[in-house]
């Protein structure tokens, strides 16, 4: 399973903490969390850009 989430910067640490706590079993295969920058976002319907598009 792959889950992708785009959040405002100030929400990233909390989201990572929640995902790790929910997914951790202590066994091989628990998965990984990658945090990457999103350079630009556009909401197609309204043409909002940046954080307003998220």
Image: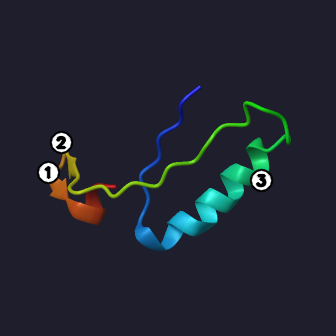
Q: Earlier in the sequence, mark 2 or mark 3?
A: 3
Q: Quadrant of residue 17?
A: bottom right
Q: Nearer the viewer, mark 3 or mark 1?
A: 3
Q: CA distance from mark 2 to mark 3?
A: 34 Å
Secondary structure under the numbered disc 2 in the rendered image: loop
Secondary structure under the numbered disc 3 in the rendered image: helix
Which residue is located at x 62 percent, y 66 percent?
A: 14
User: In the shown orientation, is residue 2 left or right of residue 48?
Assistant: right
Q: Is residue 37 above or below residue 2?
A: below
- On the image, numbered disc 3 is attached to which residue? 21
Residue at the far right: name it: 26
User: Between 54 and 25, which is closer to the camera in this rendering?
Assistant: 25
User: Between 6 and 2, which is closer to the camera in this rendering?
Assistant: 2
- On the image, numbered disc 1 is attached to which residue? 47
Query: What is the x, y in percent for residue 23?
Result: 75, 42
Query: What is the x, y in percent for residue 52?
Result: 28, 63
The quadrant of the image that shows the N terminus is top right
Near mark 2 (Cα within 10 A), the count class, few <14, some 14-19 or many ≥20, is few
- Assess whether mark 3 and mark 2 are in contact (beta carbons under 8 angstroms): no
């Amino acid at each position: 399973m792959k889950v992708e989430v785009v959040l405002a910067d100030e929400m990233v640490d909390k989201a990572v903490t929640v995902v790790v706590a929910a997914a951790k079993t202590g066994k091989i295969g628990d998965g990984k969390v990658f945090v990457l920058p999103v350079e630009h976002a556009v909401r197609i319907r309204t043409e909002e850009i940046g954080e307003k598009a998220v």
